[in-house]
């Protein structure tokens, strides 16, 4: 029988590993981004009237994007294949490049999904997600005391 020194840190590490694996099973998937896929950076801003998403996706065109909403989930995806043909010394060489990504965002109930707008400009996909009128903060109302 071997004598092993007990280390309380190992117990804590094990606890957190088990917690995250049981609560977030998707985190067990080590290959979250498939080969040829990228995961663009996203900025999310909130104002009183709307949410704004900025997604860095340089080299794309507006028609490359597929933006959908289903069951309160905003999905943004791209699949783009480009080919470059080089001719040197009567030899033709083709290089294929495939880019894809898909991001999902759970929309809060306060978003008016019928008024969402998207625009692609200078390598950034901008989405404006207006809030429903009832979700916007209302100004304080003075009540006269009689």
Image: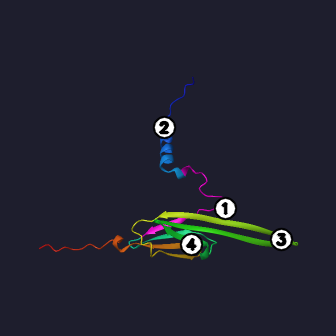
**Residue hosting label 3:** 92
Residue stretch rendered in magenta on the structure: 27-46
Dot placed on the residue nearer the N-terminal end, 1 or 2: 2
The vertical placement of 23 against 94, above or below, is above
Position of residue 85 measured from the top left corner of the image (x, y, whole percent): 78, 72
Left or right? Give the position of 143 relative to 109. Answer: left
**Residue hosting label 2:** 11
Q: Main secondary structure of the magenta part?
A: loop
Q: Which element type, helix, strand or loop, lies under badge 4?
A: strand
Q: Is residue 39 magenta?
A: yes
Name the front one of labels 2 and 3: 3
Query: Which label number is shown at residue 36?
Result: 1
Query: Which label number is shown at residue 124?
Result: 4
The answer to whether the residues at label 2 and label 3 have Cβ atoms under 8 Å apart is no
Residue situated in front as seen by the camera: 55 or 115: 115
- Determine the CA span between mark 2 and mark 4: 45 Å
Report the label total: 4
Residue situated in front as seen by the camera: 124 or 83: 83
The answer to whether the residues at label 3 and label 4 have Cβ atoms under 8 Å apart is no
Dot placed on the residue nearer the N-terminal end, 2 or 3: 2
Q: Residue at x 49, y 64 (%)?
A: 105
Q: Residues within 10 Å of mark 4 (few under 14, many from 20)?
A: some
Name the front one of labels 1 and 2: 1
Dot placed on the residue nearer the N-terminal end, 1 or 4: 1
Q: Which element type, helix, strand or loop, lies under badge 2?
A: helix
Left or right? Give the position of 30 relative to 108. Answer: right
Left or right? Give the position of 31 relative to 132. Answer: right
Name the front one of labels 3 and 4: 3
- Determine the CA span between mark 1 and mark 4: 20 Å
The vertical placement of 8 against 133, above or below, is above
- Determine the CA span between mark 1 and mark 3: 24 Å
């Amino acid at each position: 029988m071997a004598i092993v020194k007990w280390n309380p840190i190992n117990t804590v590490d094990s606890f957190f590993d088990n917690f995250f694996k049981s609560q977030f099973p998707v985190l067990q998937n080590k290959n979250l981004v498939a080969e040829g896929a990228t995961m663009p950076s996203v900025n999310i801003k909130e104002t009183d009237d709307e949410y704004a998403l900025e997604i860095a996706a340089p080299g794309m065109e507006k028609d490359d994007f597929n933006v959908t909403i289903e069951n309160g989930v905003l999905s943004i995806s791209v699949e783009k294949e480009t080919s470059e043909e080089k001719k040197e010394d009567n030899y033709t060489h083709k290089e294929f490049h495939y880019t894809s990504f898909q991001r999902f965002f759970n929309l809060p109930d306060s978003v008016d999904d019928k008024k969402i707008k998207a625009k692609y400009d200078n390598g950034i996909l901008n989405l404006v997600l207006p809030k429903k009128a009832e979700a916007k903060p209302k100004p304080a109302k003075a009540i006269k005391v009689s």
